[in-house]
Amino acid sequence: MMQEKRLLEALAQIATAANAAVDECAHGHGQHAHADSSDDGGHDDVPGCVVKSLPQRLLVKAAYTARTLNPVNAPALISNALISGGIRIDDPMRIAVLTSKYWGPQLRRMTVSFMESTPSDLQKRIISHMNAWSGCCGISFVATSGVGDVRISRQPGGYWSYLGTDIQHIPKNRQTMNLEGFTMNTPESEYKRVVRHETGHTLGFPHEHMRASLVARIDPAKAYAWFLKTYGWDKATVDAQVLTSLSEASLMATPPDQTSIMCYQLPAAITKDGKPITGGIDINKTDCGFAGRIYPKAGRALVLSGDTETSEQSQVTRTDDWPEEEDVEVFV
């Protein structure tokens, strides 16, 4: 009983820290501060990305959606390990905390809309970079004049996205991804680094730099000071977004890769070995291979998001909240 109590307390602390962190940094604490990259040749301006969290009341529903769309999301490996140690993981909230958010293996075409009036050339450019992933896997993105599965805003708030299947629980009048300030004048390198990274989150991919072996290289005291100075992040934000490692048992993933597009660039100034975590600037071969493995392109039925019909294709964190009455009823 004491072991289970400790587990419950730990899970509650993780959820609380993550929600508090997203709360803090999603509301403008220096998202676009200039990083001092003189010691490791990094980007001049590297805004921190936040994986947005749903309101707590929706976590269990979102976990059910994720497991229904893709049973592999269920935390079976974690549950079995804990059960073998004499701990029962059967409470819905506990399961929700441990559930992945990958879409299922069927071919899927997701619609994209923009919250603000956005020139057609800019829409095409953003979606073309989102579709850089479609060259690797069976998920593609297409513009719609209606309300998209993915809804993009370019308003203040930094760069962020909800994770994978969670986007189905976001009210239709709210964005699921934010690309602050993107225009046709934004450098192509930023389209590759940011748009493709945020689209990775929409596909369900977490931050690569939160893999245990990479987190182990970071000096917490140095990280707290650097993120406070650079982005205005407090300790809880750094803990949740940088220093809390992902459970390897919960990942359908490749070995840790610091050049993954899903990895932050982190400076030598905050690592124990004095070497930077280089971070990814584009989808690399490992990213592409992993995406193709969990979202295979060939021999699957095409799923049009929001539509129950399928057609066969040939072989080829302030946590956002809103009034409860706006909650989306998801049917899967």
Image (tube, rainbow, N blue to C red):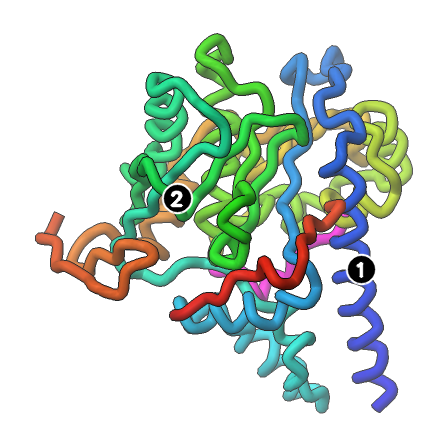
Label 2 neighbour load within 10 Å: few <14, some 14-19, many 20+: many
The answer to whether the residue labelled 2 contacts the one labelled 1, judged by CB atoms less than 8 Å apart, is no
Residue at the spot 58% in from the left edge and 37% down from the top edge? 263
Q: Quadrant of residue 75?
A: bottom right
In the picture of the structure, the residue carrying the numbered disc 1 is: 16
Mark 2 or 1 closer to N-term?
Answer: 1
Q: Quadrant of residue 156?
A: top right
Q: Is 98 positioned to the left or the right of 124 in the image? A: right
x, y percentage for residue 151?
47, 40
- What is the x, y in percent for residue 139? 31, 47
Q: Residues within 10 Å of mark 1 (few under 14, many from 20)?
A: some
User: In this view of the protein, which residue sits in the foreground, 289 or 272?
Assistant: 289
Magenta span of residues: 243-252
Tag 2 residue: 148
Which element type, helix, strand or loop, lies under badge 1?
helix
x then y, percent, for residue 300 = 19, 60
Classify residue 331 by image quadrant: bottom left
Q: Is residue 102 above or below residue 42?
A: below
